Amino acid sequence: MSNSTMTVTNKAIGGYFNLELASRGSFPHDDGILLNTGRNAIEYILRSLGVVKHVYVPYYTCIVVIEPLEKLGIEFSYYHIDKNLEIAEHISVSEGEYVIYTNYFGLKDKYVRELIESGVYFNHLIIDNAMAYYAQAWEDIPTAYCPRKFVGIPDGGIAYINKGIEVQETDYSYDRVSHLIKRYDLDAEGGYQDFHINEDGLMGQPIKRMSQFTQALMRSIDYEQVKSLRKRNFAILHNALASSNALSLPEPKSYDCPLIYPYLCNDKGLKKYLISQRIYVATYWPNTYDWCKPEDWEWNLADCCLALPIDQRYDEVDMHRIIDAINTYKGE
């Protein structure tokens, strides 16, 4: 018997097969702190910062950002963004106070860089890159990612921060994948209820390390292809819809990879029409109505900004179907 076969482990040998996933070796930000959810990436950062007295969050952001603040008993208040999706006015911060900025739709990479390089919130800034998985992580700037917004995985979050806390326990994801599998066999509607069950199940989860299954899924994805297809689809929609889009979007060279195509129009009926055509558009974010007034810019974004899908599952034909549906609704 050769020495190479003498290693003793507790690994099971034989039996039934597992799901086979090709490994591409790595994925974006796999050098960060791999955690079980995006909101826990924010909580991880807050816990690692030590004494956090107050946090400023944008009115226009996901409610899951508030979950770790409430969980940790941290005081917070809201701030406005302008029509460029940037901080509307200077926020005065003191020791132990932080500003969370959301990289909206993955389109504000340039602004994030300018914000960091200006030093205006030096040592008081947290970047929420949940919508910007491909955006770079900056040294010494706490940053959170949520890759499942970009690819088909059940959970997972990534945090960057110096001197992070220790996390011992690893999560499991085997009971969170039914919606991902049902979409293959039953299409979007068939797994929709399971999707919401999974979303609800991620609330209140303790901080754990990312599951082995989620990591395996992430290593199986061609991220360069994902980025290429997203950028192509975004460009198709932008070329056709820019002239009627009430939202002014940054130059394509200023960001790495978009999440969706944000299309701002003042006709609320368009969203219902698109859904009736099986073109499903997410709402970002209904919680904004509870925090803002109807006259606020953020209310308008939550009310009228359509998140048109541009992800890697779709081709040019799909993008033109979206365009044709919008033009048909408008009678063009």
Image (spheres, helix red, strand yellow):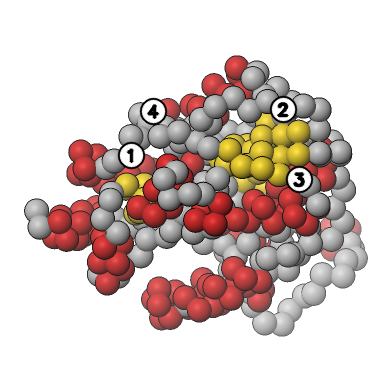
Disc on the earlier residue, 1 or 3: 3
User: Horizontal and vertical percent for residue 309?
Assistant: 36, 55
Q: What residue type is disc 3 on?
A: Glu
SS label for mark 2: loop
SS label for mark 1: loop
- Label ID, residue 247: 1
- Label ID, residue 146: none
SS label for mark 4: helix
Left or right of 15 in this view: 102: left
Disc on the earlier residue, 2 or 3: 3
Q: Which residue is mark 4?
A: 253
User: Horizontal and vertical percent for residue 176?
Assistant: 62, 72
C-alpha distance separating marks 1 and 3: 32 Å
Q: Is residue 61 above or below residue 207?
A: above
C-alpha distance separating marks 2 and 3: 13 Å
- Disc 4 vs disc 1: which is toward the camera? 1
Kindly indicate whether the residue at mark 3 contacts the one at mark 4 (C-beta within 8 angstroms).
no
Q: What residue type is disc 2 on?
A: Val
Q: Crowdedness of circle 4 by 10 Å Cα count: few (<14), some, many (20+)?
A: few
Give the image quarter of residue 97.
Answer: top right
> Looking at this view, is 269 or 22 the one in front?
269
Q: Which residue is mark 2?
A: 93
Q: Which residue is mark 3?
A: 75
> Looking at this view, is 303 or 330 the one in front?
303
Q: Residue at x 37, y 60 (%)?
A: 281
C-alpha distance separating marks 4 and 2: 32 Å
Q: What residue type is disc 1 on?
A: Leu
Left or right of 282 in this view: 217: right
User: Horizontal and vertical percent for residue 231?
Assistant: 36, 42
Residue 154 visible in the snapshot: yes
SS label for mark 3: strand
